[in-house]
Amino acid sequence: MTQQKRALITGITGQDGSYLSEFLLEQGYEVHGIIRRTSTFNTDRIDHIYEDPHKEGVRLFLHYGDLTDGTTLRRILEEVQPTEIYNLGAQSHVRVSFDAPEYTVDAVGMGTLRLLEAIRDYQGRTGIQVRFYQAGSSEMFGLVQEVPQKETTPFYPRSPYACAKVYAHWQTVNYRESYGLFACNGILFNHESPRRGETFVTRKITMAVARIFAGRQKKLYMGNLDAKRDWGYAKDYVKAMWMMLQQDEPDDYVIATGETHTVREFLELAFGYVNLNWQDHVEFDPRYLRPAEVDLLIGDPTKAQQKLGWKPSVTFEELVSLMVEADLQALGLTSPNGKLANAIMDNAMIRQEVGVL
Ligand code: NDP
Ligand code: GDR
């Protein structure tokens, strides 16, 4: 009998955590997630896959914990005995990391170290091999050193968040080299979806488009429209995380589309989807600027393509369309000119996505 694969996910309530859980459950895994205690429920993104743990055959389990609380991480590790750990938990908002640098670095940087230490001890004591995925970020490249950015491009982080991710990246490399831990760094470029947090630029735009189209909002206040990002679809990206942990050897991989677009282009497409002109609605607010900006991100996913066989399945235009469409549907609206049907509904993955919401 083959051993039941058991995954532990930090950040399971986030965008990526929810897609990864779905994916791993589909692959037959038992999935355990660490959630934080909050005064209102924060499990919206995983409610549709959560079942009463008293029921037979349930494969998704949640545990209270926090990356700032090492004792609990150790306890959960002992209890769950996972074969794979995905460290997705983070204060992941770059702008907010300038406001709350100590907390961000504690959760993102020290949190990763706490987890690595717990795994090192657990593995040393039990002899059970644990595979570890670290959610690294293209923000680590920061100030442009090379274009496109790949695994060998030097890091130049430009925010407390990015500095903490660089720290976590190198600790992960060090635990691999020092203790033989099967540990991989994914260096993921921006990835979005209808489940994207509402204060990240893409979702902020698509929600505003739907609300403006519905007559419920007039203006959208934005920061730097010149920033360029390599935007992909989150569902594609969580698959890459899993693929990294199925290889014979642990390694680090850039996951990206290889295309870059400005925030302005995103605005144009998103408003254009409902036949609106973004310039009639968008205004500048300096509060959304960062003390230091990352101007240009564009990734080279060649290594992931060659070694993992990974490639993105959703284009930039499709991504914008599916996000606007989902936000329109959430308000009970349909797109004005049937663009969804013509442009993207032939893609089964997107059909499923829109159906979820
Ligand atoms: P989200 O912000 O959507 O989710 C973050 C998750 O981390 C949430 O489940 C959140 O819990 C949890 N979390 C926050 N603080 C703590 C803490 N102190 N202890 C434990 N858990 C915590 O992020 P994404 O899903 O978009 O991203 C997943 C990971 O990938 C993050 O590490 C992010 O930095 C990284 N990343 C993301 C990219 C992207 O484009 N999305 C690109 C590259 C890297 P709660 O729900 O309670 O707030
Ligand atoms: P980013 O994502 O910082 O790239 O980090 P975000 O969507 O927040 O910003 C992208 C770009 O848009 C510009 N921008 C605005 N951003 C926000 N949030 N709100 C605005 O009003 C606005 N106006 C312009 C920003 O200045 C920036 O240049 C995301 C996060 O998911 C990280 O956790 C992850 O590591 C990286 O992507 C890869």
Image (cartoon, rainbow, N blue to C red):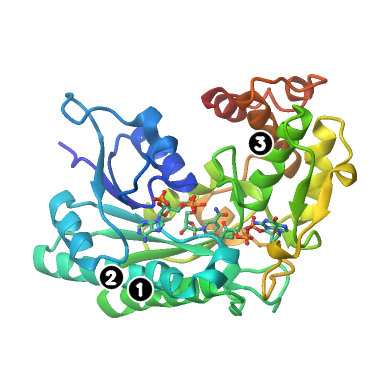
Q: Earlier in the sequence, mark 3 or mark 1?
A: 1
- In the rendered image, the residue lying farthest to the left is 125
* Residue that appears at 77% across and 28% down: 215
Residue under pointer 2: 114
User: How far is mark 1 from mark 2, CA to CA?
Assistant: 6 Å
Q: Residue at x 53, y 41 (%)?
A: 235
What whole-number distance in Å separates the C-alpha atoms at marks 3 and 1?
34 Å
Q: Name which of mark 2 and mark 3 comes first in the sequence.
A: 2
| Quarter of the image with the C terminus in it | top right
Label 3 sits on a secondary structure element that is helix
Instruction: Evaluate whether residue 78 shows in this view.
Output: yes
Q: Please provide percent x and percent y for residue 309.
A: 54, 49
Q: The disc labelled 2 sits on which kind of residue?
A: Arg
Mark number displayed over residue 110 = 1
Element carrying mark 2? helix
The reply to whether dot 1 and dot 2 touch (C-beta < 8 Å) is yes
* Local crowd size for mark 2, using a 10 Å CA cut-off: few (<14), some (14–19), many (≥20): many
Q: What's under tag 1, amino acid-wise?
A: Met
Q: Secondary structure at mark 1?
A: helix
Q: Which mark is residue 323?
A: 3
Is the CB of mark 2 within 8 Å of ligand 1?
no
| Label 1 C-beta lies within 8 Å of the nearest ligand 1 atom | no
Depth order, front residue of 103/342:
103
Numbered mark located on residue 342 in the image? none
The answer to which quarter of the image holds residue 224 is bottom right
Q: Give the amino acid at mark 3.
A: Met
Residue at (13% x, 51% y) in the render: 79
Q: Residue 29 appears at what percent x and percent y?
A: 29, 39
